[in-house]
Amino acid sequence: MFYSNIDVSMKTKLYTATCLFILFLLSLPMMVQAKAVHLLPKPKHLLVKTKEKAFRLQRDVVLDDATATPLLKTFLLESGCRVVEKARAKVRVELVDSIPNMYDYVLYGYDNEAYSLQVREQEIVIKAVKPIGVIRAAQTLQQLSEGYDKRKSIEAVEIVDYPAFKLRGFMHDVGRSYMEFDELKKQIYLFSRFKINTFHWHLTENQAWRFEVKGLPQLTDGRFATRHPGKYYTQKQCRELEEYARQYGVTVIPEIDMPGHSAAFERAMGYEMQTEEGVATLKNILTQLAQTFVHAPYLHIGADEKKITYPKFVQIMTDHVRGFGKKGVIWYPIQGDRTGADMAQLWSTAGRLQAGIPNIDCRYNYTNHFDLFADIVGIYKSSIYYSHRGSSELAGFVSAAWNDHLLSSDADIMKQNNVYAAVLASASRGWTGGGRQYIEQGGTILPNEGEEWEDFNDWEQRFLFHKAHSLKNEPIGYVRQSHARWNITQPLSHLDKRHLPYAHIPDVKALLEEVKKEKSQVVAGSGIYLRHTWGNIVPTVYDDKALNHTVYAWTYIYSPRRQEAGALIEFQNYSRSERDFAPPAGHWDYKGSQVWLNYEEIKAPDWVQHDVRVEHETVLLDANCTARKPIRVQLKKGWNVVLMKLPYIQTDKVRLNKWMFTFSLTDVDGKNALEEVRY
């Protein structure tokens, strides 16, 4: 509950008892074993048989599987079962012609993933249309077995499940930022547990070429790389990764970007791609790519961000790809003729669905621009390209971590780009479908109550359960935010000098009382965009008309005891693709934002990088809250008040002038939200 004008003395005693009881209930999911309520994505049809006993693992079982799906047997063995010829407990797999109420459509290279699952005390029955459905059922069983310290079991359930969108993917741009081979394998394994089924591997960029080409060693020669020189993947590794991914039902789509993003190619080869020599070399490269990724239904040829001048360039390359029984993917829009492309991957606001071929929605899934909290709300709430389910012209989505900026490690790339939360928010929407509106209409704001809030809170609880279990060793900055509530005032003009940036505030308590008299609205979440990264294209609280105005955000937070806590605080999220100035010394941002806790100002950190432009090849250090430790704050017992001043002014120090704030109370390490507090 949230009180906009609270009488603290009248409500404290009642609220103390209430919040302690709620704390107990909310903490239960993290304390108990996995149940169907933790499944992520949420299955289409679920019946929990509360009166039936669970199927106990760690015993002898008979496995009757005509598909011989390795993942199912691996799951049983890793769960302590012994697969034998005779036993009371049985796991049985049947291939059937259809699954009740299933939805499916034709997409080259992607089979029907529908399955049904019945779990009883002595028997598990899996039915699937294709073997890939058995893999999806096994991944559901994996999730249902999580969180058991001793005797593992699986809750008695009946599930019928199938995806709304057939292609659900994640992408890494290893051309810019090389990621270790074993790290990529681990991510494929972990993401597949949540029914991600595509890894888009962007292998080449201006900075470096990462795919080994036999006979052309200069392409991967460190002398021609500007980042992570000498780092690349051998063809043997590529084959190994593809075979590994297949075990988990993941398709690899490798990309050689052409004719743009090709500076590394030009440095190594001494000529451009759009020449006779270049085209001949690219055909050789695509031949080796096709022979390496033998199971890939698609090869991605990029084709974006450079004017295509070579006649019928896309047609020539896709015709060559088709010669290996594969299809060609391009980015869209491109600066030229797309004739011949078999699939379009939509990027930027200019990306529009291309009729007659499958399309992948990637328009707002660039996680390099995402903040820690608000963008997760936006991408989870959103439908996929205005649609509630896929079709022959809408394949699905890819969540892309375009890490243009140099970061210190693979873990830093994953944490600063919030990859796990972003991909799994998209994966949930891709599997379940729906979404009330596309993000261009729905925006990033989380209502403080109602159906949208309940839906997001449900997703969040599921995600945080898995963060504490299968993802417990991964660099995830996201913590619970749906419980947070903020009052946000209307824009107040800078003509009133009190609201000017950096204006001296002699009496913060008096300022708050004045602020509380202003018209305001209540929103939920720990990260709020007042104006988005993409301006007015993605609706938030305010638009350009609020320039040269200031708003205030404020809330009361109840703590049952005096305690030290961590605070994740941010007023300018630094995109991992920019060359912006690091924060100014002594200040949170270049707009004059301030924050007070119990009327005492929380000072900005002593920035390691400050007042200097951080170039792409300089490591971005502590500008983002995910890259530094939380600010330590002291909460008093009872009600604590937080006030934030949020001016909106133009600044030439950052290209994407995000008008926003992040404030989240956590444990001192920033690992989890401080659950015992209430807003």
Image (cartoon, rainbow, N blue to C red):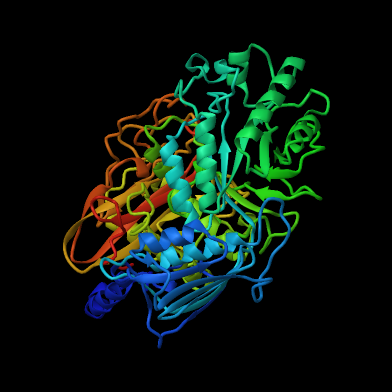
Q: Position of residue 510 (x, y in %)?
A: 30, 58
Q: Is residue 548 visible?
A: no
Q: Position of residue 584 (x, y in %)?
A: 36, 32
Name the residue at the left extreme.
Answer: 562
Q: Horizontal placement of 655 versus 503: left or right?
A: right
User: Which of the pair 165/400 is nearer the observer?
Assistant: 165
Name the residue at the top extreme.
Answer: 270
User: Which of the pair 307/268 is nearer the observer?
Assistant: 268
Residue sitting at x 47%, y 54%: 374
Q: Position of residue 53 (x, y in %)?
A: 37, 83
Q: Horizontal placement of 332 versus 433: left or right?
A: right
Q: Position of residue 215 (x, y in %)?
A: 60, 17
Where's the C terminus, which quadrant? bottom left
Residue sitting at x 44%, y 52%: 190
Q: Quadrant of residue 12?
A: bottom left
User: Which of the pair 165/591 is nearer the observer?
Assistant: 165
In the figure, 531 relative to 555: above or below? above
Where's the N terminus, which quadrant? bottom left
In the figure, 338 relative to 164: above or below? above
User: Which of the pair 668/151 is nearer the observer?
Assistant: 151
Q: Horizontal placement of 159 versus 319: left or right?
A: left
